Image (cartoon, rainbow, N blue to C red):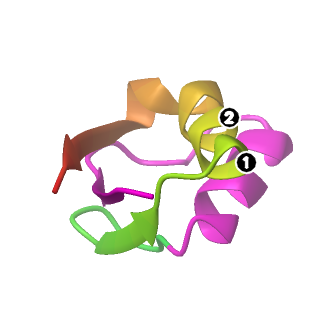
Amino acid sequence: MTQIKIKLIKSVIDRPERQKRTVKALGLGKIGSETEVENTPQVAGMVAKVQHLLEVTEL
């Protein structure tokens, strides 16, 4: 599978609890934090749910 880099670009303050937990499950904390993960169907679904908060690049 391919790797993707995910960067949190917007705050999770005033977001539903479900979105906050999804961002945390992706390994992101503060604004500007980045992580590299394998692009599995599960991760792709999580990214799709909070795509308005993230910047995603394929490696």
> Is residue 10 rendered to the left or right of residue 19?
left
Structural crowding at the residue carrying mark 1, measured as other residues with C-alpha within 10 Å and reported as few (<14), some (14–19) or many (≥20): few
Does the segment drawn in magenta span residue 25? yes
Provide residue 29's location: percent of width, then percent of height. 47, 74
The residue that disc 1 covers is 42
What amino acid is at disc 2?
Answer: Gly
Task: Tell me what residue is drawn at x 35 percent, y 40 percent.
Answer: 54
Task: Tell me what residue is drawn at x 26 percent, y 46 percent.
Answer: 9
Task: Tell me what residue is drawn at x 73 percent, y 48 percent.
Answer: 42
Q: CA distance from mark 1 to mark 2?
A: 5 Å
Residue interval drawn in magenta: 1-27
Depth check, front residue: 39 or 26: 39
Residue extending furthest toward the front: 1
Task: Tell me what residue is drawn at x 71 percent, y 53 percent.
Answer: 22
Q: Secondary structure at mark 1?
A: helix
The residue that disc 2 covers is 45
Q: Are marks 1 and 2 in contact (CB under 8 Å)?
A: yes
Placement of the C terminus among the 4 image quadrants:
bottom left
What amino acid is at disc 1?
Answer: Gln
Q: Secondary structure at mark 2?
A: helix
Give above or below for 11 relative to 59. above
Give above or below for 6 relative to 51. below
